[in-house]
Image (cartoon, rainbow, N blue to C red):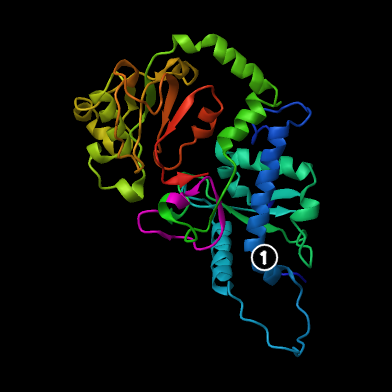
């Protein structure tokens, strides 16, 4: 008999095209090259996860066999502690009737199907998790897993690949202290930036952006629709009619491990808005809402910062950034030049349309979408990457 992850634990199939799970059913169509690349990329991520947790699968999936006297001493198992912690955490989460918002969601990839505990289906119906399930399902339908995902000495298809999904903004890694709560691989929507925080200390495995998946899968289900979008945007917002400023809109979110105790003026986004207030001829930046710990002080804070109206995403392409240079720090944002074209100085960005992109609680989900517009994107040096 093969050993299972948890005895007497029942699983339910995660039905990708179930209307209760997926709110829109798409007609069958020819796979777009970009969508296929995303699905393959997600499977590559699962392959990495499979390799990282290979010892788990071997220890739980192999049938017991008679002991044999080894002909040579075996090397010690380096990941034994890591494996035991993963198994313990996976079992604990699997047995919970209710998961907290910050808890990783456990599920199995088994025989080409996605399985989860029935009480956990609610967590897998969220926008982010649903996008992941769609990506995996699309990849499995392409049959790439037959040659790569289960290529170990003994097939693990019968007992499944255990997966933990960090479904919220967090990834289990503290970038302020450079330590982590979960010292084993798990899927997350971002990882610490190796340029800013170094690498090798966080075991989170970054996934393909759910924002991009939704854009390709729903809005752009064929690659050529991007050309149509670009042509439309260029007609709607001609270059010569753009406003000569860089634009940003957002809320007062901020990364907790680094700025939990910071004053309002010291959080990165507040510094950006302050820079816009000091140089309104260059930057149009403003808060659309006060959230989290600053929500109660909205009336007082509104007097010292800039509160601005929400601007729809596409309408922000009316703005043209002029002569900006940013320092690389989580947002010690410094404007080195003012409108250089009017003062005869060399500019970093001269007569170019621009979005400003800056992290909030974690990574910036809209960054990849900004790169697909016909706008220049000014990316403030970040703590997280995808």
What residue is shown at x 60% (from left), y 42% (from top)?
A: 208
Tell me, yes or no, whether the highlighted magenta stretch contains residue 193. Answer: yes
Query: Where is residue 227, by image quadrant?
Result: top right
Q: Is residue 73 above or below residue 39?
A: below
Taking depth in this image into account, of 155 and 244 the one nearest to the observer is: 244
* Residue 218 visible in this rendered orientation of the protein: yes
The percent position of residue 68, horizontal first and vertical second, equals 77, 88
* Residue 17 visible in this rendered orientation of the protein: no
As drawn, is 226 to the left or to the right of 315? right
Tell me, yes or no, whether the highlighted magenta stretch contains residue 267. Answer: no
Q: 10 Å neighbourhood of mark 1: few (<14), some, or many (≥20)?
A: some
Taking depth in this image into account, of 52 and 22 the one nearest to the observer is: 52
Q: Which residue is mark 1?
A: 54
Numbered range of the magenta stretch: 175-195
SS state under label 1? helix
What residue is shown at x 41% (from left), y 42% (from top)?
A: 382
């Amino acid at each position: 008999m093969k050993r299972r992850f948890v005895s007497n634990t029942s699983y339910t199939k995660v039905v990708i095209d179930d209307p209760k799970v997926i709110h829109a059913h798409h007609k069958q169509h020819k796979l777009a090259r970009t969508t296929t690349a995303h699905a393959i990329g997600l499977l590559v991520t699962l392959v990495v996860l499979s390799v990282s947790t290979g010892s788990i699968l071997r220890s739980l999936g192999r049938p017991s066999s008679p002991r044999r006297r080894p002909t040579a001493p075996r090397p010690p198992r380096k990941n034994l502690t890591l494996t035991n912690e993963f198994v313990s955490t996976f079992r604990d989460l699997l047995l919970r009737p209710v998961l907290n918002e910050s808890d990783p969601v456990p599920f199995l990839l088994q025989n080409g199907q996605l399985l989860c505990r029935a009480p956990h289906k609610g967590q897998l119906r969220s926008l982010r998790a649903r996008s992941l399930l769609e990506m995996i399902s699309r990849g499995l339908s392409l049959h790439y897993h037959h040659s790569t995902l289960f290529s170990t000495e003994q097939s693990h298809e019968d007992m499944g690949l255990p997966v933990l999904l960090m479904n919220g903004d967090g990834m289990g890694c503290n970038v302020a202290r450079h330590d982590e709560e979960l010292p084993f691989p798990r899927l997350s929507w971002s990882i610490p930036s190796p340029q800013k925080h170094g690498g090798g200390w966080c075991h989170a495995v970054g996934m393909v952006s759910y924002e991009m998946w939704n854009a390709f899968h729903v809005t752009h289900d064929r690659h050529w629709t991007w050309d149509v979008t670009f042509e439309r945007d260029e007609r709607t917002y001609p270059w010569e009619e753009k406003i000569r400023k860089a634009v940003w809109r957002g809320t007062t979110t901020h990364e907790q491990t680094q700025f939990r105790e910071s004053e309002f003026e010291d959080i990165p986004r507040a510094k950006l808005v302050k820079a816009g207030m000091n140089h309104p001829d260059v930057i149009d930046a403003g808060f659309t809402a006060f959230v989290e710990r600053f929500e109660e002080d909205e009336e007082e804070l509104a007097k010292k910062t800039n509160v601005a109206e929400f601007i729809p995403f596409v309408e922000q392409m009316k703005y043209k950034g002029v002569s900006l240079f940013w320092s690389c720090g989580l947002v010690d944002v410094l404007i080195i030049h003012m409108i250089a074209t009017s003062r005869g100085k060399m500019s970093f960005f001269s007569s170019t349309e621009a979005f400003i992109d800056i992290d909030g609680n974690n990574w910036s989900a809209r960054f990849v979408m900004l790169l697909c517009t016909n706008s220049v994107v000014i990316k403030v040096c970040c703590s997280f990457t995808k």
